[in-house]
Amino acid sequence: MKNAIQRGFTLLELMITVAIVGIVATIALWDSSDTLESNRAENYLLDLQRMISFARAKAVSTDTIMTICRGWENRIKGDQVSICHPLPNESNAEQVIFVFSNDEARYQSNVFQWYEPYYGDEVYRMIAPPHKNDRLAYSGDAYIMFDTGGTITTNVGTFVYCPNPDNDDNNKALQVSKSGTALYLGDTDLTCG
């Protein structure tokens, strides 16, 4: 008598295979857009927090007035005079946020701020604009100015980063205090509108 050879799968082997295929399909089809939006907002605000800390430290260590504002990258890189635009304004995708030194005698806190390389203003740090579809809002003055003691001389507020204008679930916030510190708040109900 010949031994009969059985060919095929057992029920257990089939169930394990289906489970593995299901797990792989779930991973492949998982919508990670929420996670990406949340990470993008958090990373941008943490970069901004580092910039604010840098500007404060630079003001104290060099005994110089330091200003954070928004401006046109091509004018700043081309050493051309540039006005500080509000932090932020509607053209988020086209303007960078930058830190520069200036002279308090030329810039009173109640007038427009200008970056003027001809008078010795120097750019120390620059952050690229937010992602093209994202919004950034700031409830304080149009710029942040540090005096030589590291205190902010302008009205402070809160930065809100909105990675999806149609959905406020992933909005993140960064609060700036009068003492010159910035506190990352994380998730927020605040909007950019």
Image: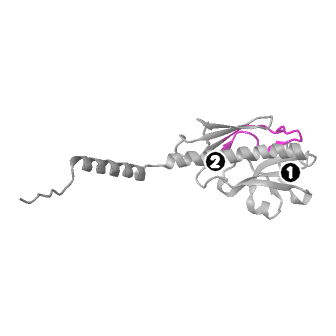
- Residue at mark 2: 43
Q: Is residue 140 visible?
A: yes
For numbered disc 1, what is the local secondary structure?
A: strand
For numbered disc 2, what is the local secondary structure?
A: helix
**Furthest residue toward left:** 1
The residue at 68%/57% (across/down) is 94
Q: Amino acid at mark 1?
A: Ser
Q: Is residue 133 left or right of residue 129?
A: left
Position in image of residue 103 (x %, y %): 91, 49
Name which quarter of the figure residue 78 lies in: bottom right
In magenta, the rendered stretch is: 137-159
Position in image of residue 183 (x %, y %): 70, 37
The residue at 62%/44% (across/down) is 42
- Residue at mark 1: 101
Position in image of residue 61 (x %, y %): 88, 45
Of the numbered discs 2 and 1, the one sitting upstream in the chain is 2
The residue at 70%/56% (across/down) is 95
Name which quarter of the figure residue 144 lies in: top right
**Furthest residue toward right:** 105
Point out which mark residue 16 bears.
none
Q: Is residue 142 visible?
A: no
Nearest the eye: 1 or 115: 1
Q: Residues within 10 Å of mark 2 (few under 14, many from 20)?
A: few
- Of helix, strand and loop, which mostly describes the magenta segment? loop
The residue at 76%/37% (across/down) is 181
Q: Where does the C terminus fall, quadrant-wise?
A: top right
